[in-house]
Every structure is written in C-alpha cells, then in structure tokens.
C-alpha cells in the first residue's frame, strides 16, 4: 500500500476512456495516456541532446518496456529527421524475470543475457518501464559492465517512491509514482492490463481475480 504521507490521489476513472472489461478492477488513473506521451517526447529530446552524435544501441527491457520503448524511439526518430543533432540507433531486447504475482522476488532471471557480449565497446541506452527497488536494474548493470560497453545510460518511465528502494536512480526518469501496484500502458499483472492506455491503480479485488 502507499505510505500514509503519500497523498497523490490521481484521477477518477470516469474522466477517461477505460476498457469496459477493466472498469471493476481499477481504483484510479494515476497518469493519463496523453501525459505519458508528452513526457516521453521531452525525454527523447533530452536523450538526443546528451547522446547525439554517438551510435546508440537502445536495449528494451521486455515485456513491460516495449510500449514506452516504441513511443520513445518514435519521438527520437522524429527529432533525427527535424533537428541538427541526431542519434544513429540500433535496437536490441532483453527480458528480466523478477515477479511472481504482486511481490517482487529476490531472484532476477535474465533471458537473453548471453547476447550481452555484443554490446562490448557500444553506447547503450537501457529502456525500462518501472524501477521499484532498483535491484533488478542494478543486476542488469552489473552484467553489462562485465561486457565492457563504452557508455551505459538508463531511462525509466516510472520510479516508485518505496522504502524498499536500494537508492538506485536512472539517468532519465519520466515520473515518480506512489508505492501502489500499477497497471496499464504495458504494465501488467500476470499478463493482464497491457491493453490499458492509462497507468492506473489496481484494486485488491483484481489481485485475487487475476491471480495465477
């Protein structure tokens, strides 16, 4: 649950279009889709400003990161076409498994980790959907460092305010969010809610309903 002093309430569901099959599963909208897109556009501008001129390997952390990854790259592509400074981009994908239902587990399984050796000497931009404790990202960064990339930057759409945090902060961050279980915009709960455009708070009944 959110800490008592975290008074960020979000928005009523009936202010937005939400799929009917999820209406009973959500408490509130925390970040509307339009706001996500506006912030992503600004993150793209900041990344091009800081990393422009270098060839970048954009590394998407699947599955949650795919929507943010696609939208971020679309904005970077638009900037490449319309600005004096551009970023040559190639893409790669990795999957990290650290969840069972709504509790983050201590073990982090990296799927596709054998391919990290191709990043030696490269400038890498890791694109993640959410940083919670930070330990998952620290594990990935540790694995990456063994491959000796030239540079590594991390962009995460969300960073949770949680007492469980290791203190890790990404180089680029979209939003800080309360310590609720969030779904939508490709954030899932046991694979559900990836088809929800807004980032919303999952209610307790839904945790039971969609539990594996």
Image (cartoon, grey):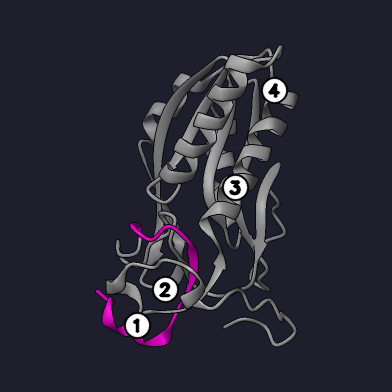
Q: Position of residue 13 (x, y in %)?
A: 48, 76
In magenta, the rendered stretch is 194-212
Which residue is denoted by mark 3 in the rendering? 156
- Quarter occupied by the N terminus: bottom right
- Secondary structure of the residue carrying numbered label 2: loop
Foreground mark, 4 or 1?
A: 1
Structural distance between the alpha carbons of marks 1 and 2: 18 Å
Q: CA distance from mark 4 to mark 1?
A: 43 Å
Is disc 2 surrounded by few (<14), some (14 to 19) or many (20+) residues within 10 Å? few
Circle 2 residue:
102
In the rendered image, residue 156 lying in the magenta stretch gets the answer: no
Q: Kindly identify the residue that appears in the image at 27 percent across and 82 percent down.
A: 209
Q: Nearer the viewer, residue 35 or 98?
A: 35
Look at the image and tell me whether residue 148 can be seen. no
Residue at x 42%, y 73% (from the top left corner): 102
In the picture, the quarter occupied by the C terminus is bottom left
Identify residue for label 1: 24
Q: Nearer the viewer, residue 128 or 205?
A: 205
Per the model, the C-alpha gap separating discs 2 and 3 is 20 Å
Q: How many residues crowd around disc 3 within 10 Å: few (fewer than 14), some, or many (20 or more)?
A: many
Quickly name the residue at label 4: 51
Q: Residue at the spot x=60%, y=56% of the render?
A: 158
Graded by Cα atoms within 10 Å as few (under 14), some (14 to 19) or many (20 or more), the crowding at tag 4 reads: some
Indicate the secondary structure of the residue bearing disc 1. loop
Measure how far apart labels 3 and 4 are at the Cα level. Answer: 16 Å
CA gap between label 3 and label 1 equals 29 Å
Percent from the top left, x then y, of residue 103?
44, 73
Q: Residue furthest left?
A: 212
Q: CA distance from mark 4 to mark 2?
A: 35 Å
């Amino acid at each position: 649950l959110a800490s008592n002093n975290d008074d960020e309430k979000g928005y009523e569901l009936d202010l937005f279009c939400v799929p009917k099959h999820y209406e009973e599963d959500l408490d509130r909208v925390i970040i509307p889709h339009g706001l996500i897109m506006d912030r992503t556009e600004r993150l793209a501008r900041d990344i091009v400003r800081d990393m422009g001129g270098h060839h970048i390997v954009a590394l998407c952390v699947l599955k949650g990161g795919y929507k943010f990854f696609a939208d971020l790259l679309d904005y970077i592509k638009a900037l490449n076409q319309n600005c004096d400074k551009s970023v040559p981009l190639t893409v790669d994908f990795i999957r990290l498994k650290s969840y069972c239902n709504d509790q983050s587990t201590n073990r982090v399984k990296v799927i596709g980790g054998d391919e990290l050796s191709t990043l030696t000497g490269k400038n890498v931009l890791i694109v993640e959907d959410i940083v919670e404790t930070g330990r998952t990202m620290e594990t990935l960064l540790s694995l990456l460092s063994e491959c000796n990339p030239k540079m590594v930057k991390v962009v995460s759409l969300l960073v949770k305010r949680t007492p469980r945090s290791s203190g890790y902060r990404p180089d680029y961050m979209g939003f800080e969010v309360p310590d609720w279980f969030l779904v939508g915009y490709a954030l899932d709960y046991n694979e559900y809610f990836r088809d929800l455009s807004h980032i919303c708070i999952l209610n307790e009944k839904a945790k039971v309903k969609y539990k594996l």
